Amino acid sequence: MRGLDSAMLADTVAQARRLPRLRSLLILRDGQVLAEQRFNGGPPLDRPVNIKSASKSVLSALVGIAIARGVLTGVDQRALSVLGSEAPPDPDPHLTRLTVRTC
């Protein structure tokens, strides 16, 4: 695999194992699972977990990717324009002012 050889992957898992608060690790590339490990009594890997505030980082990265690919025009785009046909027919006035930035 380009950029990530088996020694680097093994080292990453070994370093993760030493983190006392880490409960699980899942590494994917192009949809292929490269590593999946449970640590410190973590839940089964097939069970969803609450990732708490990490979702903010993930969502901001996805917004950046969507802007770069032209899916979104920018963070000041109105959320209703993204919803398209899924938007409510008579939205709350607050929703009409909501932007990608303020979501």
Image (cartoon, helix red, strand yellow):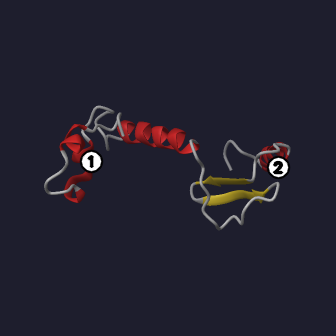
Nearer the observer, 52 or 37: 52
Q: Secondary structure at mark 2?
A: helix
Coordinates of residue 18 in the picture (x, y in percent)? 86, 44
Which numbered dot is residue 22? none
Nearer the observer, 100 or 12: 100
Residue drawn 68% across the image and 50% down it: 1
Coordinates of residue 31 in the picture (x, y in percent)? 57, 59
Residue drawn 22% across the image and 37% down it: 97
Coordinates of residue 25 in the picture (x, y in percent)? 72, 53
Q: Amino acid at mark 1?
A: Val
70 lies left or right of 35 = left
Q: Secondary structure at mark 1?
A: helix
Image depth: mark 2 or mark 1 in front: 1
Separation (CA) of disc 2 from disc 1: 41 Å
9 lies left or right of 102 = right
What residue is disc 2 on?
Answer: 10
What residue is disc 1 on?
Answer: 82
Q: Is residue 46 above or below residue 90?
A: below
Quadrant (top left, top right, bottom left, bottom right) of the C terminus: top left
Q: Is residue 25 above or below residue 57?
A: below
Coordinates of residue 71 in the picture (x, y in percent)? 32, 44
23 lies left or right of 28 = right
Residue drawn 51% across the image and 40% down it: 56
Q: Earlier in the sequence, mark 2 or mark 1?
A: 2
